[in-house]
Structures are given as structure tokens and as C-alpha cells.
Image (cartoon, rainbow, N blue to C red):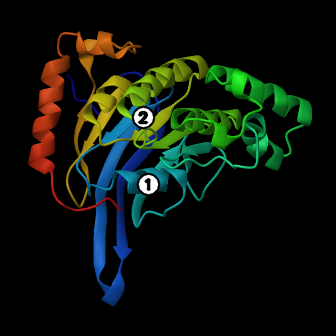
Amino acid sequence: MTSATTTAGVSAKLHLQDVSKTFRVRHGDDIEAIKAVSFETPENEVCVLLGPSGCGKSTVLRMVAGLEEPTSGELMLDGHPIAGADRERGMVFQAYTSFDWLTVQANVEYGMRLNAVPKKERRERAAHFIELVGLTKFSQSYPKQLSGGMKQRVAIARTLANDPTILLMDEPFGALDAQTRWHMQELMMSIVEAANTTVLMVTHDIEEAIFLGDRIEFMSRHPGTVHEEIIPDFKRGKRITTKEDLIGLDGYGDLERHILKLMREQGGDDTDH
């Protein structure tokens, strides 16, 4: 593994500098959720936020999404300050967010329809991303007829169809069974490659972080900050497409043990904000 602030020679797509967030709770007490978080994500990279429960991973993601405002610090996307939610930042949540009364096709078209995309264009774009996530045969099905993994594919397709600058994912596979989860992880890698997408993702799962991440920002326990930036050098700058190939690489076991040690050192009983 290697540690670095940025990838040499690559400009940042997403830039966070000294970002902090303090929440006011009952009785006027303040809770500092994150403190001086700084990192950069180059374009077309998968950056994973990993760390113990309570380190503020989801808080960071929500601020990048524009759903929370930082108490201090700077968040930039493509050189512009992040201020409020915007379609350029597409979000995929752990909970299933499809509309039960709409078909897969209509769900994927929904955001484009709100943004007044012409009917022909939105149908073509929806069909493209439905095919990308492997749901063409189910385009006229309703969410209640789909498995959990399929519902998350719909959410990913809908988000990508809106042409976001960055894809934000908050434990998107956390509710899935183990087999469906690793299948979705592999599918996500193929989608990211095909769509040439920049991704910022939150996970608690070490193996998932190593498999998906081009870089991992490991956060300390509360108040969370970037404890260590990890770039798995055994991938040699390439993305691994199957879990079997990943765990067979020299260096994988060492990195997994290293992150497990970090988890033990930084672990606590707090809950994420």
C-alpha cells in the first residue's frame, strides 16, 4: 500500500480542506462530528470513506451532497464551492428509494422528467442505463416484483441517467445478503468503468473498501478526521473485476490486516452522525 495526498500529476475532481462539522443538540450542548477533514479525489476515481462507527463518514458524504453545511472548511467540486443539493451530485442510499407505483423504466426516467428532458431523449437514456445495470428484461416491472439487488440497480441507473458529475453512495449494498452484495460490487465496477464515473462511497466493510476503492480515506474515531490515506499499490493502478482475483493478489492480505488493526485502534461505541 502507499499513502499520499493526491495522485501525482492528476488534478482533483473533489477537494475538501479542513472541513469540520459541529451539531447542536438538546440543552445547548455541541457535538463535534468531524474535525479538519482534508482529502482530494481525482476524476474517474472511486474514493471510499472507511472507519469505525461514529467517525462521521456519512456526515462527510452528506456535506458533499449538499444535504448538510460544514461549520468550517472548504468543499469544492470541479473548482467550485459546494452549496446546497444539486443534480451534479447524484446520491444512492442504502434504503430502497424507487417509487412503487412506477415501472423500472419510469423510475429511471423520473429525474429527467423533472428536469424537462425531452421524452425521446429520456427514454433512450433510461434504456441505456437500464441495460448497463442488467435490467432490460425487467424494464416494465414494478419494484415490488424485484429483489433487493435489483432495486439498488434501479437506483444506480436512475442516478446515472441524470448525468451527475460525481456519484455519492452511502452503504448502498449494506442491506443485501452476502452473495447479492459481492455480485453488486462486481457489477458496480463494470458500471463505473463503462460510465467513466467519479465515485465517493461510504462503507463499514473492509473487503468492500479494498475491492472497490482506488483510494481509501480511513477516518479516526469521533470526532472524525482522515487518519490515513491508503492507495492499494498491489492493484498497480488497475481495477480488479472479480473478488477471486482480488484476494489472490500479493499484498491483499497484508492490507486487510493493516486496516483491521486500524479499526481496532480507532474503534469505539459511538454511532455515525
- Label 1 SS: strand
In this rendering, would 55 be left or right of 100? left
Question: Which residue position is annotated with label 1?
Answer: 74
In this rendering, would 102 be left or right of 181? right
**How many residues crowd around disc 1 within 10 Å: few (fewer than 14), some, or many (20 or more)?**
some
x 68%, y 34%: residue: 163
Task: Judge whether 20 appears above or below 167 on screen.
Answer: below
Q: In front here: 205 or 161?
A: 205
Task: Judge whether 6 appears above or below 100 on screen.
Answer: above
Looking at the image, can residue 6 be seen? Answer: no
Q: Position of residue 188 (x, y in %)?
A: 49, 25
Task: Judge whether 39 appears above or below 64 on screen.
Answer: above
Q: Where is residue 154 in the image (x, y as percent from the top left)?
A: 63, 35
Q: Position of residue 180 (x, y in %)?
A: 44, 29
x 74%, y 45%: residue: 111
Looking at the image, can residue 170 be seen? Answer: yes
x 32%, y 56%: residue: 56
* Image quadrant containing the N terminus: top left
The three-letter code of the residue at mark 1 reads: Glu
Q: Position of residue 92 (x, y in %)?
A: 54, 43
x 20%, y 18%: residue: 252
**How many residues crowd around disc 2 within 10 Å: few (fewer than 14), some, or many (20 or more)?**
many
Question: Which residue position is annotated with label 2?
Answer: 41
In this rendering, would 258 be left or right of 69? left
- Label 2 SS: strand
- Tag in front: 1 or 2: 2
Res 215 quadrant in image: top left
* Image quadrant containing the C terminus: bottom left
**Dot 1 or dot 2, earlier in sequence:** 2
